[in-house]
Image: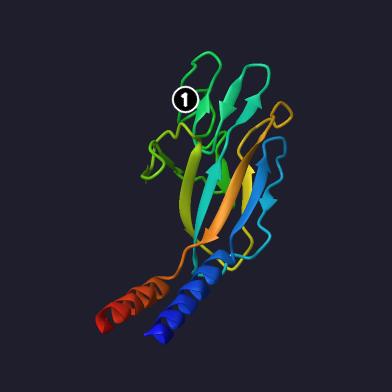
Amino acid sequence: MKIRIVIMLVCVTLCLISSLAKAVMFEVHSEYSTPTQTSFMMESGIFYRVEVSGNYLCNVSTDIRADAEWQRTGYLQSWIEYYPEPGSPPEYLDLLVNENSYDWLGTIDGINFSPHTYSPTHNYRIDIIGTGEFANFRISDSAYHDNSGYLTVQINQIPEPSMLLFLGVGSLFLRKKR
């Protein structure tokens, strides 16, 4: 029985290590138009969870703040999903991934994430599939000289379903033998 437990613990540890091996955290600064590139190539066909937190000042003189998906203008004093400036694209002031706009999933309670949801803690996430290339992150803006601050991005490889199945079957095996 002890050998089975040790084998199961080793398998669980290996699964956790393999899923954490691709975890990386970095900052995307609002002052730069050049994208921030990941430090590793995202394996083709592998799922990754991209989590972003924080907010930045995108216009020092008019007190416009933004996070990955929502903006707050100084005169509105409430957070809105789309910047109300005429002629602005829908992704204006959002965090772009590989120059693509996403509906970042927001959370009210820190547990449940859904699209078009403002997160008072400024925590958002999306799941993407790796393409075998580096990923690039950039804040969409027309003028970067009046910005201040950054968004923090964390990327984690999502464990493959086969690993989760392996863990589930292994735990049933342990339970059945008792």
Spot the residue most to the front.
2
Find residue 153 and report its horizontal and vertical position in percent: 59, 48
170 vs 53, left or right, is left
Which residue appears at 27% of the width and 81% of the height? Answer: 178
Q: Is 5 above or below relative to 46?
A: below
Q: Residues within 10 Å of mark 1 (few under 14, many from 20)?
A: some
Q: Describe residue 105's horizontal placement relative to residue 39 as left or right.
A: left
Name the residue at 36% across, 45% down. Answer: 112
| Amino acid found under the numbered disc labelled 1 | Trp
In this view, the residue in front, 122 or 69, is: 122
Q: Position of residue 97 (x, y in %)?
A: 57, 50
Left or right, 67 with respect to 12, comes to right
**Residue 5: % across, % down:** 41, 80
- In front of the other: 176 or 138: 176
Which corner quadrant of the image does residue 57 belong to? top right
Residue that label 1 marks: 79
Q: How is the image coloured?
A: rainbow
123 left or right of 145? Answer: left
In the displayed structure, 89 sits above or below 10; it is: above
Rendered residue at 56%/64% (across/down): 20
Q: Secondary structure at mark 1?
A: strand
Q: Quadrant of residue 27?
A: top right
Along the line of sight, which residue is nearer the eye, 147 or 52?
A: 52
Give how far across and how far down residue 161 sits, in percent.
39, 71
Please give the count of numbered marks on the rendered protein: 1
Q: Residue at horizontal 53%, vertical 64%?
A: 130
Q: Quadrant of the N terminus?
A: bottom left
Work out whether residue 145 or residue 170 is closer to the camera in this orientation and state it: 170
Where 47 falls versus 154 (above or below)? below
